[in-house]
Image (cartoon, rainbow, N blue to C red):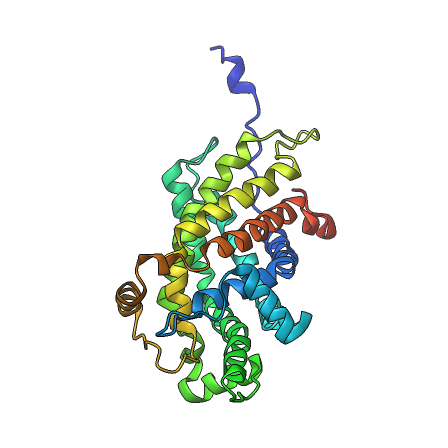
Amino acid sequence: MSTSSSSNQPAPPVKQFSLLPKIVNGGIAGIIGVTCVFPLDLVKTRLQNQTVSPNGERMYTSMVDCFRKTYRAEGFSGMYRGSAVNILLITPEKAIKLAANDYFRHLYSPGPGKLPLLREMAAGGSAGLCQIIVTTPMELLKIQMQDAGRVAAQAKLEGRTVQKVSATSLALDLFRSKGILGLYRGTAATMLRDVTFSVVYFPLFARLNDLGPRKSDGSGEAVFWCSFLSGCASGSLAALAVNPFDVVKTRLQAITKDEGGPKYSGIADTFVKTLKNEGPTAFFKGGACRMIVIAPLFGIAQTVYYLGVAEKLLGVQK
């Protein structure tokens, strides 16, 4: 009996998934990205966390005003307040987020061809869920350090002094008073923000990245500027979509409150009080600044991630 010629053809090789290089690439991408955009993130946090006084006055009137006042009061180093803990923890955070998304895309793939949208969203959401273990303590300490300068500046205007704090002292105080769970204050709000962000971001990035020209080396990968622009566009749109969750998370994690300001007991309570006291526009406080932060952060991170530095260092084929 004769067999068809197609049955004699060797099966295409199964693409292997190498997790270690992706984790290393994610860490490198995160460090470079956060170093570039940290001052913008600091401004975003201070804009989101400020409250309006009874006479309608605000400490910062705009993003530019916040930059100017922060630099004038605290100097260049003040623009990187809280960056040490963020850069230290951004390595595993970005490594987990980017590598986990690739892992879950590989795991959820039904076979050769394009991953269906729902599975892309599930992969992104799974990656966002995995990063919470690192993201929550990092965000809590970062926000405290970033907001400490605003509190000190406000106290100075009122003729008061505030004791200087460090990330280490904050972490130790939380650990002594509330145990390890103290570092996970605002986990639910962080999860709500990060899982939703990843569900939106990763499928959108994958589709935009597929639209651009490919490299001439036959790898089928997009050229670097396409990955950069795709990361910027996807990051900014996803950031805007989840900004209300980010405002809630920031307010829940800000331990040092303005005197006379509202106290929040949870996600629902924060939503209700913010809406009642400040209106719906409060949920988009710092939204433009957050988009400006997230766009280059993910544009840079995705570009560095796809450069494959780890594969070259470890001698692994991409």
161 vs 148, nearest the viewer: 161
106 is higher (above) or lower (below) than 254: above
Question: Which quadrant, please, contains the C terminus?
Answer: top right
17 vs 300, nearest the viewer: 300
282 vs 127, nearest the viewer: 282
Q: Residue at x 43, y 50 (%)?
A: 240
Specify whether 78 is left or right of 14.
right
**Residue 112, visible in the rendered structure:** yes
Specify whether 293 is left or right of 311.
left
Place residue 89 in its image quadrant.
bottom right
294 is higher (above) or lower (below) than 154: above
203 is higher (above) or lower (below) than 21: above
Place residue 280 in its image quadrant.
bottom left
**Residue 91, visible in the rendered structure:** no
Specify whether 267 is left or right of 240.
left
| Spot occupied by residue 181 in the image (x, y as percentages of width and height) | 40, 78
154 vs 183, nearest the viewer: 154
Q: Residue at x 40, y 74 (%)?
A: 185
| Spot occupied by residue 74 in the image (x, y as percentages of width and height) | 63, 75
Q: Residue at x 52, y 42 (%)?
A: 233
Q: How many marks?
A: 0
| Spot occupied by residue 315 in the image (x, y as percentages of width and height) | 72, 48
Q: Residue at x 51, y 74 (%)?
A: 147
| Spot occupied by residue 190 in the image (x, y as percentages of width and height) | 40, 64
Kindly give the residue lying farthest to the top in the view shown: 2
